[in-house]
């Protein structure tokens, strides 16, 4: 759908169930399965069948309704990853309320920030979460009822006592009616890479569109690994896509590559939804030779780009792997582009074509003029899949005059309308009139066998603007030097892109809970050095 006249790519029209109730959409799918495993914790071995998942969610919904929960109420969930998490999200949505998650690892400052944005009325947490953040939680008097996922402690009501006493009839239960286009089903948070996380309101319609099944509906693909947390748009909606197709979700608690590989062998994983750093790990480690990964067919990677050589390296080492697919996504609208929709198959370096329900234009960041193929500019998007809005933020600060969301990401599309992400606009290093994308240098550095991971930022210099400076974590056992890495990079890139700001070796890169490199922290480290 390439409109050469207006250079707006994609199609906003997409078919959705008429009732526009996310709870009903998912419940109708869940009821089709019974004793098949829906969720498997690949670390502890805990499993939940479709029948038990659905019963739990419906019991919870009935209990919440009895407690007085109603449309418009915000119910928070704070917990480590566990099987109860998914049916708890669903129970809240079935009750017509709005679900919002808080991450156990987010830390006090971010938790306070998120709670002051959303002001939940009900709070469902694990005992671990309660014990970690009790003082923060108690300081918010917006919360009327605290419920624990575990055995009752202190003043918390036990969810088990709420849900086991009512064996609700799953076949007769109907989720509470909502206004699908306006009522908010989920409030999720942006990752907080560029500043404090923003509260993203997703309506029932947004959630349905984000969960429509897509290409891996093939029956031979039965087991899907989701690496991330159920706090993020991508992992949350990938989980619902997979459940809507009646397949098995596999997850682990610790972000450990070894536990991941063991779980993939044990649960015969066919598709792994992972973060790019794990693909880089797979391209270098010998660990996976200890595991039988013959079931592996596809790897999906999101959130930052992969170098095509990294992809080739993994494919060579896992001969049964059919492909590694990349997409471009964000909390505000799911996956505006996806490799899955590529009519010409995956293209190296591309994040694919526009997903259904979205239109995209590329705009000159200065003149705001719309650009054509192969011209770099800000990615702006629009469509029914796009959020209702950030909580408490004036829409005119993030929408343009045509209602397109200004993503702040620099990118372009080619003559086949395949998209390519360059980097965030604010991160681009300006050196003597040249524009340098730190992501490009990071992916090149990561290809070096002596490098485990790398982050690149601009170092201010007189007259020329900024020069790229790198922070590098060495591979265990490597003693690669600054000079070696500088000459390696110099051989790969144009002279203006060389690492003139130097290389600093560090133990670990600062990352947010999504695993994204925090370049703002690297810039602070650069100032201090
Ligand atoms: P915040 O908005 O709070 O600063 P964030 O933008 O990192 O955090 P997310 O919504 O999780 O929060 O991430 C979306 C962003 O991730 C995109 O806007 C883009 O910058 C980046 N991103 C996503 N997919 C890719 C990809 N395939 N390649 C490069 N960058 C990507
Ligand atoms: Mg963002």
Image: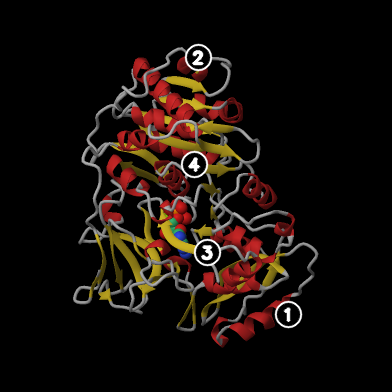
Left or right: where 348 falls relative to 452: left
Left or right: where 34 falls relative to 200: right
499 or 71, which lies in front? Answer: 71
Residue at 58% x, 18% y is 151
Q: Earlier in the sequence, mark 1 or mark 2?
A: 2
Q: Distance from label 3 to label 4 (Cα)?
A: 22 Å
Q: Is residue 155 above or below residue 125?
A: above
Q: Earlier in the sequence, mark 3 or mark 4?
A: 4
- Residue 483 is tagged as 1
- Residue 228 is tagged as none
Q: Earlier in the sequence, mark 3 or mark 2?
A: 2
Residue at 64% x, 55% y is 293
Residue identified by numbered label 4: 230
Image coordinates for residue 318, horizontal then vertical, percent: 63, 64
> Where the N terminus falls, by quadrant?
bottom left
> Do the residues bearing badges 2 and 4 touch, measured as CB atoms within 8 Å?
no
Q: Distance from label 1 to label 2 (Cα)?
A: 63 Å
Left or right: where 244 falls relative to 82: left
- Residue 161 is tagged as 2
- Residue 324 is tagged as 3
Residue at 52% x, 64% y is 324
């Amino acid at each position: 759908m390439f409109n050469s006249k207006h250079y707006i790519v994609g199609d906003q029209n997409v078919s959705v169930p008429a009732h526009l109730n996310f709870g009903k959409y998912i419940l109708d799918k869940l009821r089709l399965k019974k004793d098949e495993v829906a969720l498997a914790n690949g670390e502890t071995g805990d499993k939940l069948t479709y029948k038990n998942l659905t019963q739990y969610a419906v019991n919870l919904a009935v209990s919440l309704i009895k407690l007085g929960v109603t449309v418009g109420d915000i119910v928070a969930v704070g917990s480590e990853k566990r099987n109860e998490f998914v049916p708890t999200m669903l129970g809240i949505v079935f009750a017509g309320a709005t679900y919002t998650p808080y991450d156990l690892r987010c830390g006090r400052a971010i938790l306070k920030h998120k709670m002051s944005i959303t002001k939940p009325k009900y709070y469902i947490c694990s005992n671990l979460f309660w014990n970690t953040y009790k003082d923060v939680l108690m300081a918010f008097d917006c919360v009327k009822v605290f419920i624990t996922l575990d055995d009752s402690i202190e003043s918390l009501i036990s969810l088990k006592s709420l849900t086991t006493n009512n064996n609700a009839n799953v076949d007769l239960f109907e989720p509470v009616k909502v206004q699908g286009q306006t009522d908010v089903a989920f409030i999720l948070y942006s990752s907080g890479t560029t500043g404090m996380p923003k509260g993203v309101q997703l309506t029932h319609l947004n959630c349905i569109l984000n969960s429509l099944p897509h290409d891996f509906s093939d029956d031979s693909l039965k087991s899907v690994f989701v690496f991330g947390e159920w706090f993020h748009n991508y992992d949350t909606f990938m989980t619902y896509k997979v459940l809507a197709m009646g397949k098995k979700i596999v997850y682990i608690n610790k972000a450990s590559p070894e536990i991941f590989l063991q779980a993939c062998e044990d649960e015969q994983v066919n598709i792994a939804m992972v973060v790019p750093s794990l693909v880089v790990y797979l391209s270098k480690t010998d660990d996976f030779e200890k595991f039988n990964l013959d079931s592996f067919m596809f790897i999906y990677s999101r959130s930052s780009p992969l170098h095509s050589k990294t992809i080739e390296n993994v494919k060579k080492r896992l001969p049964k792997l059919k492909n590694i697919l990349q997409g471009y996504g964000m909390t505000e609208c799911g996956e505006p582009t996806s490799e899955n929709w590529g009519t010409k198959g995956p293209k190296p370096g591309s994040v694919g074509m526009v997903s259904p329900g979205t239109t995209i234009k590329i705009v000159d960041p200065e003149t705001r003029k719309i650009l054509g193929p192969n011209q770099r500019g800000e990615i702006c998007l629009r469509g029914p899949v796009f959020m209702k809005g950030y909580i408490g933020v004036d829409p005119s600060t993030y929408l343009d005059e045509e209602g397109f969301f200004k993503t702040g990401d620099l990118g372009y599309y080619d003559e086949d309308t395949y998209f390519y992400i360059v980097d965030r606009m604010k991160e681009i290093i300006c050196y003597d009139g040249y524009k340098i994308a730190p992501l490009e240098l990071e992916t090149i550095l990561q290809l070096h066998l002596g490098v485990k991971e790398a982050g690149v930022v601009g170092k201010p210099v007189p007259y020329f603007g900024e020069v790229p400076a790198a922070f590098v974590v060495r591979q265990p056992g490597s003693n690669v030097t600054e000079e070696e890495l500088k000459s390696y990079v110099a051989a790969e890139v144009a002279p203006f892109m060389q690492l003139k700001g130097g290389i600093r070796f560090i133990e670990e890169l600062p990352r947010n809970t999504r695993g994204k490199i925090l370049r703002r922290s690297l810039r602070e480290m650069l100032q201090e050095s």
